Amino acid sequence: MDCTFSPAAGGRQLEAAIARLYGSAAPAQTKRYEKLFDRLKENFGFHGSVAVFSAPGRTEIGGNHTDHQHGRVLAGSVNLDSIAAVTPTGQNVIRVRSEGYPLIAVDLTDLEVREEEKNTSAAIIRGIASWFRQQGCRLEGFDACVMSDVLGGSGLSSSAAFEVLIANIINSLFFTGRCTPVQIAQTGQYAENVYFGKPSGLLDQMGSSVGGMVTIDFQDNANPVVEKIDFDFASAGHALCIIDSGADHADLTDEYAAVPGELKQVCAHFGKSVLREVAEEDFYAALPVLRREAGDRAVLRAIHIYDENRRVEAQVEALRRNDFDAFLSLIRTSGLSSWRYLQNVVPAGYRAHQEVAVALSLAERLLNGRGACRVHGGGFAGTIQAFVPLDMLDGFRTGMDRVLGGGACHVLSVRPVGGVRLV
């Protein structure tokens, strides 16, 4: 429901929506939204109705780099989000001001791909707007102020949260909300692949858009199969932690692109485009030829994908039968596979800077055989993930922060709601 924001009108509706979404954190979040409205007024003023949106970050729990090969994943939205206050303008320009960044203005009369915009937020907005126009959406302009506590470069997909946020704004304001959460995710992937220039899979956007903990099978990428998983890590005596290694993703686009690129070389031998289409027995039968054609690293990365898809299925089954020890064992095996076979822990040729490897080694030492840890998300930089026994949590956080810097270890929970319009 739209509301003209004022202390008397709309405020009570927003307060109730914040209480439902954030629970015990609602008082602090209310102050955050008040600041958001102040920013909207300062930057654009109020032109009538104000709509409010939230899109969470996501954590990858299982399925490291399987999504772009149409594989299986286990993911969850987290209790960190990007939020927006939006005023429709009726003009042909989308203007977005994100906290700490300059104003972005996208002209809706020009939605062609721009090479000079690659790797920018403007490319994401233009790509999402283009996708909706292709579906017959009658786009109009709007002004939006955005704030986010999804840590940039953290592996929690701040970019996917932004994509889901923008797509939900357009879907709600101008497309009568007809797009499903899956389609919202596909919108973000389209913008990222075609306009932003990053050959990503669909995991990040799905984790943000759908909400809760979900397992997703991307065999039919246009119609992924999504199943909710009802499990509380705290009830199993563990905390879900994301640890910032201190390394930046900024200059690693080639490393990320090399993973699907090398797997494409493997698939080309069989006349296929993704590994899900290649039978595992055919892959192993062709190993001597594949090593010559695609190289050993490509072969090892393919081995990881085949094994990781099976691990996701096993992880889901372990959670469903409440066998958390088996789940933790699979997490450890997944992490070792990413390090040994997928090789997304240390960028090629790096010597002095191996932050993710150091973070993993430190986490293993602090856990001392309990819990589990693994590289998180795309890898090479950013974060690792750890499941930490609650009785070890304080010492674990202190130990990680001492080496990696204060605030490196973040304790998260799975948020049950994905991208949403609050009022």
Image (cartoon, rainbow, N blue to C red):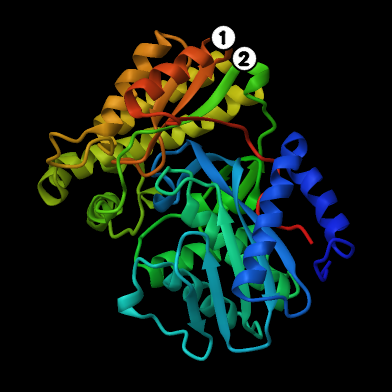
Mark identifier at residue 391: 1
Percent coordinates x, y for residue 164 in the rendering = 58, 60
Image point (25%, 58%), residue name = 268
Q: Residue at x 42, y 43 (%)?
A: 154
Q: Which of marks 1 and 2 is nearer the N terminus?
A: 2
Residue 5 shows up from this direction: yes
Residue shown at the point (32%, 23%) measured from the top left: 403
Q: Which of 207 and 227 is in front in this view?
A: 207
Whether label 1 touches label 2, CB < 8 Å? yes
Pick the front one: 330 or 247: 247
Q: Residue 63 carries which label?
A: none
Amino acid type for the residue under numbered disc 1:
Asp
Foreground: disc 1 or disc 2: 1
Tell me the kind of residue under disc 2. Answer: Gly
Foreground residue, 303 or 67? 67
From this view, report whether residue 378 is shown above or below residue 103: above
Which percent across, then down, holds residue 123?
Answer: 42, 72
